[in-house]
Image: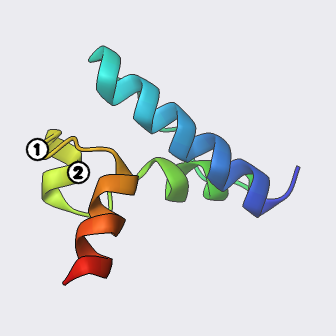
């Protein structure tokens, strides 16, 4: 499995875990696959990590394009 595929899996797992309030221990990074998963799972901002402003992405894009 490639870094890119693992990154996508990490993002999906993070989204599901955050919505379901499931804590997950990150694996030790030993290869490209685990590095991709951990990078994808890692929050991009503090608001994302805390679950603040959980509006769908499409609404954010519509507001940004209108501005």
> Disc 2 marks which residue?
48
Q: Quadrant of residue 22?
A: top left
Find residue 34 and report its horizontal and vertical position in percent: 67, 49
In-image side of 27 versus 31 (left or right)? left
The residue shown at (65%, 57%) is 36
Q: 53 or 63, which lies in front? A: 63
The residue shown at (31%, 29%) is 18
Q: Residues within 10 Å of mark 1 (few under 14, many from 20)?
A: few
Find residue 48 and report its horizontal and vertical position in percent: 23, 51
**Residue 51 visible in the shown view:** yes
Q: 26 or 11, which lies in front? A: 11
In space, the residues marked 2 and 1 are separated at their CA atoms by: 6 Å
The residue shown at (39%, 55%) is 58
The residue shown at (25%, 78%) is 66
Find residue 65 and report its horizontal and vertical position in percent: 32, 79
Asked which secondary structure carries label 1, the reply is loop
**Residue 32 visible in the shown view:** no
In-image side of 43 versus 7 (left or right)? left
Find residue 46 and report its horizontal and vertical position in percent: 14, 57
* The C terminus sits in image quarter: bottom left
Marks 2/1 in contact by CB < 8 Å: the verdict is yes
Asked which secondary structure carries label 2, the reply is helix
In-image side of 6 versus 46 (left or right)? right
> Disc 1 marks which residue?
52
């Amino acid at each position: 499995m490639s870094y890119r595929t693992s990154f996508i899996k990490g993002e999906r797992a993070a989204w599901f875990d955050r919505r379901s309030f499931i804590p997950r221990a990150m694996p030790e990074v030993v290869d490209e696959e685990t590095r991709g998963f951990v990078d994808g799972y890692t929050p991009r901002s503090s608001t994302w990590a805390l679950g603040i402003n959980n509006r769908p992405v499409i609404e954010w894009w519509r507001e940004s394009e209108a501005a």
